[in-house]
Amino acid sequence: MTDDDRRMRSGEIGPNERLAMNRTGSFDWDLDTGTIDVDEAGLLVFGLDPEGFDSRPASLVGGLEPEERARLEAVIRRAITSGETSYTAHFRTEGDEGAPQWTHVQARILRTADGRAHRIVGIVRDTTAEVTHSAFVLELEKRREVQTSIVERTTHALSRAVTVDDVTAALTGPGGLARLGADGLALGLVENGSLNVIALSGESLDALNDFRSRRLDRGLPLAEAVLSGRPRFVSSFQSLGREFPELAPYLGRLQFKAACYLPLVAQARSLGGMALFYRGRTSFSADERNLALGLAAIVAQSLQRALLFDEERELATGLQETMLPRRIPAITGGEIAVRYHAAWSGRQVGGDWYDVISLPRSRVGIVVGDVQGHDTHAAAIMGQLRIALRAYAGEGHAPSTVLARASRFLAELDTNRFATCTYAQVDLGTGTVRAVRAGHLGPLIRHTDGRVGQPKLRGGLPLGLATVFGDEEFPETRLDLVPGETLVLYTDGLVEQPGSDIESGMAELSAAMSSGPPQAEALADHLSERLWERWGAGDDVALLVLRRSPDPGTPRAPRIHQYVHQADPQGLSDARAAVGQALRDWDMAELADDAELLTGELLVNVLLHTEGGAVLTLEVLPEPVRRVRLSVQDRSSAWPRRRTPGEAATSGRGLMLLDALASRWGVEPRGEGKAVWCEIGPVERAGTVERAGTAEEAGTAVTGVTAGAARADGGARGGSRSGA
């Protein structure tokens, strides 16, 4: 039995109170006379005295707020005019003590035979308790939804955290405090008897910077929570200052009203503590305390996982560092820069590697490779394979033999992993590069004019697979590295862009090489910043940059070198333009036209009649006679042959032009090929200087008018307009 029931039986509650407690009354509204009859219970619902009510509808709703009255009248008017037979309405009135009161009306409209409304009967109920209870339930449900959302969002954010840095980023980064439902956060880890605060987030919390690293004792609330293993909920910072005097001077600078200090414990191990700060809260309900403890448990589990991962990663990366070369040997005639970047995800250890190997006869071996996988096993295989390949290269074997033996070595390791790599032997004295490729991306070459070429390297199968499938053929490709040119080897992590094909990454790499600085170290940094930090974070990257030292000559005898690919017509045009521009820059513009013409003739002969590209060299010969010397080197052992073309022939006049325009020309053997050279300018003869022929005079020479054109003794040995 309730208290109200007992009061009613004892007579303590009068008739009017009894009617009010019923909270339900009735009414009968005569529309024809404009009067309304309301029983006592109904009048009490409206807050009216039954003895003073004048039966007028306006008196019944006179206590309503104008907006509520207008809304109720609109409902009634719409029901009457639309022909409806009933209506309901909820409206708010003001109770005896000014508290809001809610009333529910449910009525039936009586109509005449012709449909005219003439009477309305219905009931009124005081639904304040129902609405209040419903609002309470809704508010409670809303709070629970907020708490559930806090837990779910925090759990989701921390589920992707791998390292301790990831955990702190999830808690303090964008949206971190909102996920926690707090306005400030401090996170500390126990390390060697100290409590080190690794994260502070929230306005005014920088006031606690003095406490970032302190010995773990009971002088601070967070340390006490860690030592006791019990949470502490603070609703008064004033009382907190009295208990912790050292902290008191700082509390006035904190813009918070409440805080909770939570120990972080995982598997009975105390990891540290977390403090959450609040601006608009002055107390903690039971649900809010449970929520804070739940958040602490989630953060503790994430930190435990992250700490274990960081320990494993430190061990793995230490292992990998010992397997990569500790130093790069110094080389003569060039410069080398190497970079290695670990992936941002996973254990940050993988099978990418680079190496620089000193070889006999002043050569150098360079290699970049990638063992399948991103784990400690891949790193271990990488270390063994790198040492084996270094040993085979150091024995002086040809590049194809080095990779064949390395493939056999990997297959004999009894592992399911394979490896890709590009290996090259470089002679920086001559610029000769002998390169082989095993399932790997080919190198790129940056030319002296900034253009970037992608030589076509024939390739073999990846190391290990080549032996398994019985195909250990790794064909060599010879490249020529002109002084000032740069060779770049890399692994696929540098050019693989998520959501795009590798061709786009190669185009980006070429553009970055072209726009970067010429020096090897500076270019390596440029490529790292432009590419790896942009999209290569998901994979390891090994990068090797080799630049042959430029050969500019001297101010009085400058020199340029340029490589022209066989299948590059634009390169031929660029070479002619480069020669003309260089001579104008050297104040020898009078020789530019002849030099451009002879450059085209020499290069066309090489590109048409030999296999491979050509190296063009333009230099100014030193005093006393200042002439220019053009040289085109190729890999063919066949020397040029003079022909006698007919008048209608479209070719065969190259050597005739050379003989007519050049002061001297000749052919020299160069290792595996030859060089055709010529000199343009005045010729020293018996104490005088004789002028060389011009392009206009060459027209006569080509048609056989001059004796120089028909001279047969020039041959492969060359000739001289001076007769010398």
Image (cartoon, rainbow, N blue to C red):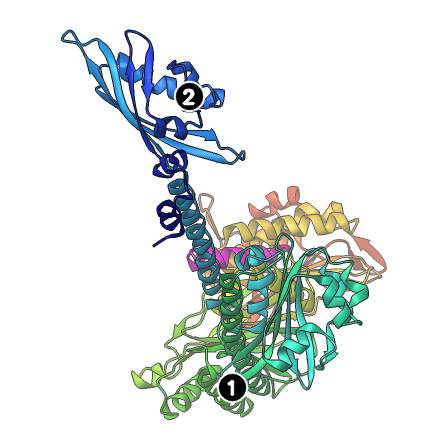
- Binning the other alpha carbons within 10 Å of mark 1 as few (below 14), some (14 to 19) or many (20 upward) gives many
Where in the figure is residue 83, as x and y percent of width and height? Answer: 22, 14
Q: Quadrant of the C terminus?
A: bottom right
Q: Earlier in the sequence, mark 2 or mark 1?
A: 2
Residue displayed at 65% across by 69% down: 547
Quadrant in the rendering for residue 362: bottom right
Q: Seen from this angle, which residue lies furthest left?
A: 113
Where in the figure is residue 472, as x and y percent of width and height? Answer: 36, 83
Numbered disc in front, either 2 or 1? 2
Residue at label 2? 51
Quadrant in the rendering for residue 81: top left
Q: Nearer the viewer, residue 627 or 502?
A: 502
Residue 245 is tagged as none
Asked whether, in this view, residue 97 is left or right of residue 417, the answer is: right
- Binning the other alpha carbons within 10 Å of mark 2 as few (below 14), some (14 to 19) or many (20 upward) gives few
Whether 318 is drawn above or below 722: the answer is below
* Residue type at the position of mark 2: Glu
> What range is drawn magenta here?
497-515
Asked whether, in this view, residue 323 is left or right of residue 502, the answer is: right
Residue at label 1? 386
Where in the figure is residue 622, as x and y percent of width and height? Answer: 81, 63
Q: Nearer the viewer, residue 63 or 714?
A: 63
Q: Nearer the viewer, residue 100 or 137?
A: 100
**Judging from the image, what secondary structure is the residue with disc 2 in?**
helix
**Judging from the image, what secondary structure is the residue with disc 1 in?**
helix
Residue displayed at 59% across by 87% down: 322
